[in-house]
Structure formats: structure tokens, C-alpha cells
Image (cartoon, coloured by chain):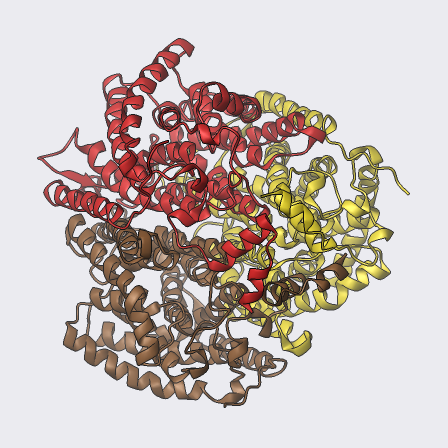
Chain colours: A brown, B red, C yellow
Amino acid sequence: MPSYATNMRLKFPILALTLEAVTIVLYALLVVYDTGDAHGHDGSHAESNTTHSSSPMTLYPMFQDVHVMIFIGFGFLMTFLKRYGFSSVGINLLLAAFGLQWGLLLQNIWHMHDGKIRVSIEKMINADFSTATVLISFGAVLGKTSPVQLLIMTLLEITIFCINEHLVVEVLNVSDVGASMTIHAFGAYFGLAVAGVLYRPGLRNGHENEVSVYHSDLFAMIGTVYLWMFWPSFNSAIAEPGDPQLRAVINTYFSLAACALAAYATSSLVEKKGKLDMVHIQNATLAGGVAVGTCADMDIQPFGAMAIGITAGVISTVGFKFLTPILASKLGIQDTCGVHNLHGMPGILGGLAGILLAALYIASMGFCYYQYGLIMKIPFWGQPPDQNCFDDSIFWEVPEEEEENEERLTHGDYSKTKTEA
Amino acid sequence: MPSYATNMRLKFPILALTLEAVTIVLYALLVVYDTGDAHGHDGSHAESNTTHSSSPMTLYPMFQDVHVMIFIGFGFLMTFLKRYGFSSVGINLLLAAFGLQWGLLLQNIWHMHDGKIRVSIEKMINADFSTATVLISFGAVLGKTSPVQLLIMTLLEITIFCINEHLVVEVLNVSDVGASMTIHAFGAYFGLAVAGVLYRPGLRNGHENEVSVYHSDLFAMIGTVYLWMFWPSFNSAIAEPGDPQLRAVINTYFSLAACALAAYATSSLVEKKGKLDMVHIQNATLAGGVAVGTCADMDIQPFGAMAIGITAGVISTVGFKFLTPILASKLGIQDTCGVHNLHGMPGILGGLAGILLAALYIASMGFCYYQYGLIMKIPFWGQPPDQNCFDDSIFWEVPEEEEENEERLTHGDYSKTKTEA
Amino acid sequence: MPSYATNMRLKFPILALTLEAVTIVLYALLVVYDTGDAHGHDGSHAESNTTHSSSPMTLYPMFQDVHVMIFIGFGFLMTFLKRYGFSSVGINLLLAAFGLQWGLLLQNIWHMHDGKIRVSIEKMINADFSTATVLISFGAVLGKTSPVQLLIMTLLEITIFCINEHLVVEVLNVSDVGASMTIHAFGAYFGLAVAGVLYRPGLRNGHENEVSVYHSDLFAMIGTVYLWMFWPSFNSAIAEPGDPQLRAVINTYFSLAACALAAYATSSLVEKKGKLDMVHIQNATLAGGVAVGTCADMDIQPFGAMAIGITAGVISTVGFKFLTPILASKLGIQDTCGVHNLHGMPGILGGLAGILLAALYIASMGFCYYQYGLIMKIPFWGQPPDQNCFDDSIFWEVPEEEEENEERLTHGDYSKTKTEA
């Protein structure tokens, strides 16, 4: 069996501070405010409300919606595990906080003006987008990785994402507004590749902590509902102002509404006694936002968006029910949050690329990420042993009372509690 | 005793998918984007910020505030019951997701341009408003209905609401910006009528699950605080831009602030030992938003708004303490969330109509809804038996650990837990 | 030992209603809508998006962000205690609801136009700011005060704040956009002075309720993440439109991102086995927003903001680990939430004043607040006895099941639970 070195005392602080130090130096050299816009467009009254640049702050409300999706949405969506809530919200914040600094740098390194990157609200939105890929991958390996491993994954994945995005959008000149492919499919398959590399035979039959409790499922719903509500902002934030942006909002809005009904219906259909499954509701209701992403700003009309939403809702729910177990048993890919069902398949569905192209795309990505996944496997990174997976207490200080409580629940030992009094 | 058929395996998916299918067909025939506005007003620079139509996105931040109230506000406000959180947030999402599609259709069927409904952000806000009526009624029957019954209620209530709104606002030409009457009083008395029809003698002495636990009350506060914060958006979103909209924001803001103090004071006054009651804080603090709704955009001045807020806060708290029990025992109306105190009476208070008019209005509504309530009574809809009321597990997959936990709590049986280890 | 009179039955309602009544009378005399703006600036098209006054609603999204920080952010940040969540969110709402009414009055009493205070969105933002000072102080005395004491503190602190702000900003003409000193340091040291006055020898060795449980720490993270996300709005809301406002957003955004990494790294460095401590994550990650406040709109460049953020993150975390215990044992200041580490030191760090000036400033403030603190000590205000500290049940109706649960946990008495069935 592999050796584990889960004490983060030195390796984590050193890595985190080193990454931040390098980032600051690069910012000192390259990053300035984008304070030209405000003046540059004073003339264009007609567009005063319909162009990003009419005011440096026009996009700010959109930015905050996306910000909420990244930090509350993704963070709480992953709190469904009974003992992994601290890590879900906490590490989500850590990775996104570093990721947005790194992403803003790498996304704009390609086209600097007189050697400088000029920070604007729009660039901040794109930086948030780049962190989304990491948070999606985080979902695939949730509970089985250390903060050190995840910081390294953030560094690598965002770097690759920026190169990939540059190629797809800038070079191939492919439109992908809501980024079904470049963000969702990318993040999902990157995460699945890593999950495959980190395969744990010891978890083949599940783990006592890989379950939810009543209130952890409610915490997760906070994430679900915020992602569901603000997805129209995610898909429209950087769309062309005016009609395209309005279409992106309306299409995403209807795709999600229709997707919700499809997810509820399918969940009831595939569950024993026709009951609803929180895992489906927490995730599959969002597939419509992913799937409509790429064509969000196009003239597909509301009913077209609804059709996409329903398809995504059904595929996603069915994926959770039947595909995830197969991925784990047959392919050795243990996808904790089932990101393949929420971001992977709906992302492909949403992509303009056809099946073949998509398949090749994934295969090549899969192979490429596999390499990187190997790097994360180095024992030194402090990957937790099987028995400590899905448990905050290995990387977080957890309230005493809880641990006792836990013990009592699992060993029926009540004596301890008395001493509390 | 009535017969129950709570297995949703087929009836729920079929109903949900049928409703969605019908909706899509109607959307394909009738609904298009409202992409004319952006151009139609380019000329009016002076109003570039003060008209809805200067940019198709001007109202978007307001829309998202209302959206948060509908999905987070109403959804979490109802999570106060210890075993009904999944249904509260989950079914709230389901009903609102279908409701906004249906509402947008029926609200605009009356005035189409060349046979089309043109979707704009403002229409999306109104669609959210139409779902509010259903979510208010949902509160009155919370814990005692099946998803199938509730989808049918959504279909019927929104249809009636759109007709009623059309008559009140368009035909009678009555101003009701915040919709105290057309939304809040309407939703409350519709829900009460249904609750009366669904009266359960078996729950006369309460139900072991019709109580809160410490953390379920905290989840409910998430809903309360969001409703409280964003109510100014609810009452001003569709007000005339400029001064009327500003007045709507300011009046609602002060009405809620004053209402909060009144609710806290009254709660302490009516409770034994002067303690505060979470039910009052979760609900009565919001009555000021309901009551000031109708006259929100009028020149009542801040102190006028505060007076309305205080009155609403006192009436609502007193209603929870003394009226709700009477409604249940004397009239056989078991109002789970006490919507009569939050939306009913404050709605009437806020309405321009005098007592008599209001009374007639309610009486007639009550009779009319009673008919519809009877439809919901058909056993086939899968209404849960008394003993399964207020319990997620009849319609949701609930984590094992919890059920055991529950058993342990109620039967003091600990042996089971040992087996977990 | 001191005498306690914790029954709020009459004193709380009377105080609350009296304060509200006085407020209404003053509003009736002094407060009107600011409905001049909309017209006053129709001419200035070029600035249509870049001045506050071009539309009365321009600042509304910013206002709502700040509003969320005040009611959700501060409210839930304090829910980390296992038995004090009702009070944290509930009393936070009460104090802020009264505070914003009182603050709006006193902040503008200094410069009225023809004897009237004209309410605008900007004034509402400033009113929210004034309540922040009280909520910060609330954190220092959390769990050890009664609602009556806290309402009196709100009245006094906001009054002093408005005078202090008037002197610092208007008279001394010192720039303090994000209000590191005038709000954060002020609120923190005011609270610490009060905490010192209310020193409880009986809590020298802690209190069984002064601990968190697993889910209470998750509720607190809701507050943390919202404060973290929206802090750029807090620091930029009232900045000069255009470039200064954009700089305020960007600087705060980067300061917080860098602060997060520093806080995580330091937490792991100072904790045994290098684990992360939720107290640090919940609070120290925000210190960057406080510290960058004063110079937020200045041209310090992104890397400068990041440097400030890192410094604040380290100082804050170290403060929680080493300084708070010393404050309690040596100076007799029991700072429940450690506001000294989140708002005090980072506030000083952020202030333009040098160490000496700051020191004098604090000393003088400290002395001045001490006086007022004495007033709160009057037994009649209903301060809870030591054994009832940090327990909602003394001022809130708490679900039975919980109390039993609690008892069971602490006394190992299970018989009671049986009777429940």
C-alpha cells in the first residue's frame, strides 16, 4: 500500500505562500488597472447601457452573480457529505482565491497592451470562470485529496485551461459563450482523469463517511439553488451586450426551468417507490444550464432552450443512477460528486462539436491530464489514507463534541458523553 | 378513513412531463424574445437610466433579487420543520420552475402583439410574482400534500391568479404595485381555502413532526433574512422608473425596519417569560413588506411607511399567537406556516379596498377556491396518510443514519446504532 | 455576585417600542424622499452611468450587496456557537433594523437642506455602514448580554459613531473610503471596551456553551463567504464613480484573495499537526477587506493591495491564536468573536494614521467608551448570569427536543427521550 504523509504543518504553508509570492511578483511586473475605459466611450450615448465599456462598473452586478456561484454555489453544493463540509466550503474558497489570481494572469498573458494586463470587471469574470474548471474537478476527487494536492491541481489545471481556451476560442475561433465545452466538459474530464489516476481499490465498496446526513443535504441545497438562480448570469455575463445578452439570459432561464421538471420526473421514475433522490435534485436540475451554455446567446428560441434543458435533465439523472456506479466498478473512476453527469455529459451535449470530435477531444484531454494526474500521486503531497477519506478531521480542527458524537453513533459508547457534564 | 396512494412512481413523472410537454408546444407557437426594445429607445438619452426599456438588461439586477426571494426566500423559510426540509426547498423549486413557465404564458396571453408573447426581463419578473401566490398557498398546506397535488394546485392557482390579476389591474384599473391583495392576500386565502378542504381531524392535536429542531430554525432564518432584505426589490421592480421606484424602495425599506422592532417587541410581550419566538421572528418581521406593498410607490413619506410596518408587525405576531390556533380548532383550517398572519391579514391591511370590499372579495374567492380544493381531494393524487405528514421520507430518499437517529430519539432504541460500526 | 433580572417581558417591549416611537416622530418632522436627483442631472449624458445621481437607482445593486453583508454576513458569521444561533442571526437583525433608522437620522442631522433629510440610496448605504459598527461590537460581547443591553448599546454607539465620523471625515477631512478606522477599528475597540467593563471572572476558564458544533461552523461559513464576496462592494459603494470606484473594487478583490491564502497558510502553521482551524478561516480570511479599506480607491496597484491582504491575513490569524487568550487572561477582555483580530488590528493597519496617532486614538476612544460601558452594567438591563451565557434558551423559545437532546448529551440521561414517543 502507498505511504501517506498527511501532516500539512510545513508543506502546505510553504506551498501556499510560495505560490502567492510568485503571483505577487508577476502582478507587480505585469498587472495594472484598466482605467482607460471610463473615458474612452463617453461619446457613445446610444449604447450607454448596452456596452460593457460605457462605464467600468456596468458588468459589476453580473460579476457578483458569478462570484456567488463560484464561492457559495460550488462551495455548498459539495457539503452534502456528512463529515466533509469544512473542506467543501473551505477548500473551495482556498482554491478559487488562488485560482482567480492565477487565471487572470494566464488568460491575459496572450494579449497584453504595451506589456501590461489591464484589470477590468470583465477580466475578473473570466478569472472566476477559469476557477470553475478547478472546482468542477474538485468535485470528482472530493474527499480523497489533500489541500497540497489540490493547490497543485489548481496551478496545473488553470494553466492548461488557459492554453486550451486560447486555442479553442481565439485560434479555432469557436463560439462558446457559456463555455459548455471549454469550462464544464473540460473541468469534468480533467477531474475524471485525475480521479482515475488516484483510483482507490480500498474504496471499491464505498466508505462509511461517503454518505449524507439530513442537514448536510440541506446545506448542499443552498449551493444548488444559487447555481440554479444565477446560471443565466454565468451564461450571459460576457455575451455581446444588447439582444445577444438578453437571449443568453432568457435561454438559460427556460432551459433550467424545463430541466428542473425533467430531473424531478426522472428521479421519481428511476427510484424505488417513485421517491425523489436529493443527489439528483441537487445536481441534475442544473444540467440545463451547462447544456445550453454554448448556444445560449443564439436564436434558438425559448422552446428550443427548453428542449435542451429537458434532454440534459433526463441524461444527467439517468447518469447518476446508472452510469456513475459503472464508471467506478468498470473503469475505476470514483467520481464523488458525479461531475460527469452534471458537467461532463451535459457539457458535451451543449458543445457544438459533434460526437466524434468531442470523443477525440476528450480522449486527447484524458491522455494529457493522465500525465498530470500522475504528478499528484506522489505520496509526499499528503494524500489521505483510505480510512481517513471523506473526513474533515484529517485536515481540519473538528469540534470535540462532534467526534465523540460520531464515536457514540458508530460504537454505541456513551460513557464519554457523561464526562462532558 | 380516506384511501391513500402515495406511490409517485408513475403518476408524478407522467403529470410533470405532460405539463412540460404542453408548455413547450405552447411556447413553440406563442413565445419569442423581446429583442425590439434595445433599439426602440436609443433616442431617449435623458432617460437612459430611468426607463425599463433603455436597455433590455436594466431590470436584470431587480429580477435576480426577486428570483432569490422566490427560490431561497420562500424555499428556506419553510424549512423550519424538523423533517420536512427536503420538501420545503425541493418542492418549492419544482413548483416555481413550472409556475414561472405557466405564469409567463397566461399573464401575457391577454395582450399579444401579432400573435406572439415577447419575453423581456420585466415579464420574467411578473412570472416570478405569479409563482409567489402558489408558494404562499404551499405554506398553508405544507406537510399534508403530495407533489402531484401541488403540481395540480400550481396549474389551477396560477391560471386563476392571471385571470384575477387581469381583472383587478387591467379592467378595474386598480393600482397594486407590491400586490398586497392580488398576490399576498390572494395566495394566502387560496391556500387557506385548500387547507380547509383538506382538513385532517387526525391532526387536531398536532403531529410529532410538526415541530422544529434547533438547526431547522436556523435554516428557516436564511429564508427570512433574504425575504427581508430584498422585499424593497419585490415592491419596486415593476414600479415606474425614477421617483416612484425610489419611493417604493424607501417605503418598503422603512416599513420592514419598523416592522422588525414591532414584531420583536410583540413576540416578547405575548410569550411566557418575555422570550422571543422564532416563528414570530421568521414571519412577522416580514409583514411590513406585505402591508406596504399596494401603496409602496405612493408619497406616504418614510414615517407613513414605518407606521404601516409597525401595525403589520403587531397584527401578524398577535395572529400567530392567538388566531392560528382558533382557525385550526374552530374553522378547521390547519395553516402550517401561518400564511394568514404573514400574507393574509397584512395583505388585506395593505389593500386599498375597505374592510367590506375585502371581506366580500375573500368570501367570493374562498367559495371559488373551495371548488378547486375539492378537486385536489381525489385520493388518486396520493395525499399522504396522517401519520406520514410532515415527513420527507414518504416522498424523498432520506439518509439511513437519520431515520435510525430518529428512531433512537423517539423509542430510545440504541441497539441499531451499534450495527452501524 | 451581581443580581440578574433576565425576564424581558416588559422592559424589552417597552424599550423597543419607545425607541421606535421616538424615531417615527423625528422622521415625521425631518425625513423626506430625495426625489430631486432624477431631474437634477438629466443634462449630463456623458456621465449617465458614472455618477451616483444620474439615476436615483444607480447605486441600488451596491446597496443590496452591503445589505446582504450586514444581515446575512454579520448575522451568520456569529452563528458558530453551538447554542447561540438564534441570537446571532435574530438579534443581529433587530439591532441592524433599529440601527439603520437611527443612523440615517444622526448621520445627516449635520447637513440638512431647508430643515429636511432627503433619503437616497447612498444615504441608505451609509446607514448600513453605521450599523456595522454595532454589529462588530456585538461580536465582542456575544453571548454575555441581553437584548435590552444591546439596544441601548446600539443607541449610544451609533450616536457616538456619527459624531466621530463627522469629526474625522467632515472636519479633519480625512479620507477613509472603506472606513478601516471609522467603522472597523471604531466598532472593534468600542466593543472591546464594553467587553472589558462587562468582564466575567466566572467565565475565566471558558464556558461549556462557548464552543461550536459541526453544523454551527458551517452556518458561520455562510456569513464568511458572503462577507468575503461582497467586501468589494462595501469598500467601493460610496467611492467616486468611475476610476476610483473601479480601483476600490479591484484592490479589495485582490487584497481578499491574497489574504485568504495567507490566512490558510498561517492557520496550518500555528495549529498542531498543521490542521486548519475554522475560527481562523471564518474570520482571518476577511481581514484583507478591512485592512485595504482606507486606501481602497487609491492607486496602490493590485500587487500593493495583495501585499496589504497578506499582512492582514497573517496578523489576524496570529492574533486569534496568541493574542485573544492574553487579552482575556491579562486584560480581562473576553472577546467572544475575536473582533480585535478581524476588525481591530486590521483596521489600525488600514488606517492612514501612524502607530502613535492610532494608539492615542484608541486610548482616548477606550476611555470614552468605558464610561458608556458602565451604563450597560446596570443589573436592571437583564444581563444573563454566567451559567446562562451563550445559551439561546434564556431569551429565545428553544425546541423541546433540543433541550432534551442537550441534556442527554451532557447528563447521559436517556429516560426522557422515551416519553417523546
Note whether residue A26 is visible: yes
Is C222 left, or right, of B375 in this rendering? right
Residue C404 image position (x, y, % from top left): 67, 46
Q: Residue at x 68, y 51 (%)?
A: C414
In the image, residue B184 above or below residue C245: above
Which of the 4 image quadrants contains residue A133? bottom left
x, y percentage for residue B255? 51, 28
Residue furthest top as drawn: B356
Q: Nearer the viewer, residue C147 or A24?
A: C147
Q: Is residue A210 above or below residue C252?
A: below
Q: State which quadrant residue A129 falls in.
A: bottom left
Residue B112 locus on image (x, y percent): 14, 33
Total marks placed: 0
Locate residue C68, reporting x and y percent: 51, 47
Q: Is residue A238 visible?
A: no
Rendered position, A375 above or below C114: below
Q: Residue at x 51, y 82 (%)?
A: A383
Viewer-side residue, C5 vs B245? C5
Foreground of the two, C324 or A333: A333
Closer to the camera in the image, A347 or C47? A347
Question: Which quadrant, please, contains the C terminus of chain A?
Answer: bottom right
